[in-house]
Image (spheres, rainbow, N blue to C red):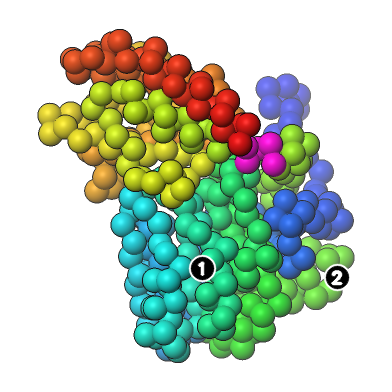
Amino acid sequence: MTANTEHPSLLDLPPLSAEHFAAVEDKVASLLRTRCDVVAMQGEALLPLEACIRAAAPRGSTALNVVTGPYGETFGGWLRSCGAEVVTLTAPFTGAVDADEVARALRAHPETGLVSLVHAEAATGNTNPVAEIGAVVREHGALLMLDAVASVGAEPLLPDAWGVDLCVIGGQKALAGPAGVSAVSVSARAWDRIAANESAPRRSCLSLLDWKERWLDGGRKALPHAPAQLEMLALEAAVDRVLAEGLDSSIARHRAASAATRAGVRELPALDAYVTRDQDAAPAATTLRVPADDLDARAVVAAALTAAPGVPLQAAGGALAAEVLRVNHYGRSADRAVVLDSLGALADGLAALGVPGAASAGDRAREAAGAAWESALRA
Ligand SMILES: *Cc1c(COP(=O)(O)O)cnc(C)c1O
């Protein structure tokens, strides 16, 4: 037998005990300040997101799907495939949805039983006022499902105080963990409605009810199957690190990264913030529009990465790819030096593409960003 010397922490792991598994769920609950049940489904966040929708959208029911970016569009497809009647409320991707618009949609469709909402979308760079929307949904009586993958650890997230019934988080954004770890909190109200839904998945990887019946109801003494220990250990390590830093300080870093990026970009030619108002900008990522007809966002990203390999820049996906790029200042990249280097790389990239004034704008952008970083931390 060959000794495992190259990946000692990946192989030969003992199984994770039920006690340890429950302790990881409890750490997630404390990160979310929730008293609800937390279920760790040990998959990429799309697993609990789809599980929530299939559990909470009975065939023939009505769901209000709020779309402020591509994830909202994905939810609409799942809701329709559940046989739900889908009411779509679309807000401009450059802003946020307003709680009054949600209230109007619920008045127009009083039979709505589920509202699905994305808190922050890294892809479009916007964030929604969940506290206000949650109050409206609670008053109406529908369940509220929230995709908080891109907000957890980056901005305040209080599912219990805000009336969120199903809150899905993932490890791969502000928590700086790997993709493949996720969790969902489930309110008592949500469990009641899921149990009453005959078409909710049962005996399936997508089943929240299986976790309730085979894990939670038995007092979390025995796991229904062998847990994915790498994922659970990674989730635990990611949550531990954020709790050790202090959740407030993680949130402050992300807020400062957003403010700094937005301030720096004002000094750069050929780029504008894609999200119009500061308060609608997601602390996890800043999206930038490339308004010039003769410039492509993908070319700007490629030139910037040539100037400074490794800065967290990315072209947007799908329909926005030519026009929008992202500064992914989440996790370890919610860092003053990383943000300043990203802005410097954009200036260098624009200069390499021949944009007038770009070469001299880099230093101004870094300076403005640094000042905005400090003033955001003082605020
Ligand atoms: C990043 C993200 C996810 C997770 O999806 P991946 O593309 O697989 O990383 C889910 N929801 C939102 C809103 C996200 O920003």
On screen, residue 341 versus residue 294, left or right, reads right
Magenta stretch in the rendered image: 248-253
Element under label 1? helix
Q: Residue at x 56, y 33 (%)?
A: 376
Judge whether 120 appears above or below 57 on screen. above
Mark sitting on residue 219: 2
Judge whether 34 appears above or below 289 on screen. below
Pointer 1 residue Cβ closer than 8 Å to ligand 1: no
Work out which quarter of the rendered image holds the C terminus and state it. top right
Q: Residue at x 42, y 38 (%)?
A: 286
Label 1 is placed on what type of residue? Ile
Pointer 2 residue Cβ closer than 8 Å to ligand 1: no
**339, 260: nearer the viewer:** 260
How packed is label 1: few (under 14 Cα within 10 Å), some, or many (20 or more)?
Answer: many
How packed is label 2: few (under 14 Cα within 10 Å), some, or many (20 or more)?
Answer: few
Judge whether 152 appears above or below 143 on screen. above
Main SS, magenta region, reads: helix
Mark sitting on residue 133: 1
Q: Residue at x 51, y 41 (%)?
A: 284
